[in-house]
Amino acid sequence: MEYKYCPMCTTPLVLAVDPFDDRERATCPGCGWIHRPAHPIGVLAVLEHEGGIVLTHPLGDGYAALPGLFVDRGETVESGIARAVREQTGLEIAVLADIARFTQPGTPLGTAVIVGVRAHSIGGSLLTRGSDGEVGLYARDALPEIIPVRAANLRVMAAWLEG
Ligand SMILES: [Zn+2]
């Protein structure tokens, strides 16, 4: 249980059966609020630009990462990944296709639903350094290694390479 008190009326929460699906959840005996946690949604883009792929280097070493983020409240998958790419690489994109969707445990926000997209630059100008570190443009046959612990990055990149 993550919440001890109701975020709506501050009454201490109790465990009770949720009539929606008969599973036990933290429930407010005062106002009826039920804690139904949802997985965050992460989006990662394989970003095609000028015949290559744009990657970031968030750790400041040789390892690379895909541009991406966890979708914010009020954002769609598409607007979220467009924002991530803009902030992290300077480019504006068109999303061409969804290439992966899976549930990934162990992300910085816990278990998350990950959407991998293939995107193409349609404007902006490539930064040398963005909000996620240095930015690099690489040929498909000369891609740097993805940060090994970033399992979702690896899965999305594998889906793109197979596609
Ligand atoms: Zn309440």
Image: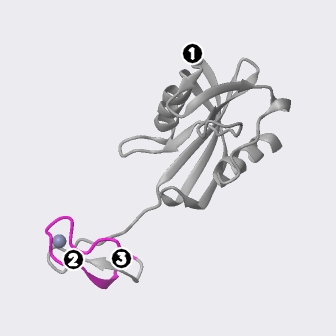
From the image, state whether disc 2 or disc 3 is nearer to you: 3
- Disc 3: residue Cβ within 8 A of ligand 1's nearest atom: no
Magenta stretch: dominant secondary structure: loop
> Where residue 40 sits: x, y (%)?
46, 55
How far apart in space, not on screen, are marks 1 and 2 (Cα)? 49 Å
Q: Is residue 71 magenta?
A: no
Q: What range is drawn magenta here?
A: 1-20
Residue 93 vs residue 65, the one in the foreground: 65
**Image location of residue 111, percent across then percent down:** 53, 62
Q: Measuring 51% from the left and 55% from the top, which residue is drawn there?
A: 108
Given the image, on which type of amino acid does mark 1 rest?
Gly
Residue 3 included in the magenta stretch of the image: yes
Residue placed under numbered mark 2 in the picture: 28
Of helix, strand and loop, which one carries label 2?
loop
Numbered circles on residues, count: 3
Secondary structure at numbered mark 3: loop
Residue in view at x 59 percent, y 48 percent:
115
Label 2 C-beta lies within 8 Å of the nearest ligand 1 atom: yes
Q: Which circle's residue, 1 or 2, is located before the other in the chain?
A: 2
Q: Can you tell which mark lies on residue 1?
A: 3
- In this view of the protein, which residue sits in the foreground, 110 or 149? 149
Q: Quick one: which residue is furthest to the front in this view?
A: 61
C-alpha distance separating marks 1 and 3: 46 Å
| Three-letter residue code for mark 2 | Cys
Relative height, residue 42 to residue 20 (above, below): above
